[in-house]
Amino acid sequence: MGHRNRRDKHHCWMIPPHKVTENQQQEEDDLIKPQKLINPVLASLQLRALHQELLFCCRQGVLPRKKPELQRVLEHKRREQLKKRELALYPPSDLETKLRSRQQRIQRHELEERRRTEGLKNVPEFVRVRQTLKRIPNSSQVLSENTGK
């Protein structure tokens, strides 16, 4: 009998299988079942590619901000010098020479305009007004030129 009591005790703590009735099944069908949210990083191909590239760079030890600022500046200067040397080896094309000459003309014109405006700032106001009036033709002069008198 002692053996039988052990089975009974063992059986008491076990949970009986859950019986689903038709009413409970209908209630479960009516409920909205939770779904896993979409991860925007994994959904976007660009972000996924960027993430893979960052992981690869991290493994290789080539992250953009790992180098000290001085080293980055020196490398930038070296690259610029190499570009200048390569450009010096080849003669400039016609388009480049035209663009340079045009740029120099524009710079000269802007410099002259600045000098002119600085010069006008020092001139008294009545002189500036008189100069603008000289540029405007009188209505009598315009009429005589149009009529041929």
Image (cartoon, rainbow, N blue to C red):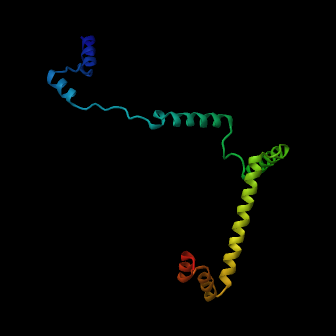
Q: Going by the picture, which residue comes out furthest to the right?
A: 89
Q: Is residue 76 left or right of residue 21?
A: right
Which of 124 and 13 lies nearest the eye of the viewer? 124
Please determine whether, in this image, residue 90 is positioned above or below residue 107.
Answer: above
Q: Quadrant of the N terminus?
A: top left
Q: Quadrant of the C terminus?
A: bottom right
Q: Is residue 21 left or right of residue 52?
A: left
| Residue 71 appearing in the image | no
| Residue 25 appearing in the image | yes
Instruction: Identify the residue at image location x=52%, y=36%.
Output: 46
In the rendered image, residue 22, in percent from the top left (x then y), is placed at: 15, 21
Instruction: Identify the residue at image location x=19%, y=23%.
Output: 25
Q: Going by the picture, which residue comes out furthest to the left?
A: 23
Instruction: Identify the residue at image location x=25%, y=11%.
Output: 4
Number of numbered tags placed on the structure image: 0
Please determine whether, in this image, residue 39 is positioned above or below residue 108.
Answer: above
Please determine whether, in this image, residue 134 is positioned above or below residue 49.
Answer: below
Residue 62 position by quadrant? top right
Instruction: Identify the residue at image location x=25%, y=32%.
Output: 32
Which of 96 and 7 lies nearest the eye of the viewer? 96
Q: Is residue 108 left or right of residue 7?
A: right
Which of 98 and 56 lies nearest the eye of the viewer? 98
In the rendered image, residue 44, in percent from the top left (x then y), is placed at: 48, 35
In the rendered image, residue 122, in percent from the top left (x then y), is placed at: 68, 84
In the rendered image, residue 143, in percent from the top left (x then y), is placed at: 53, 79
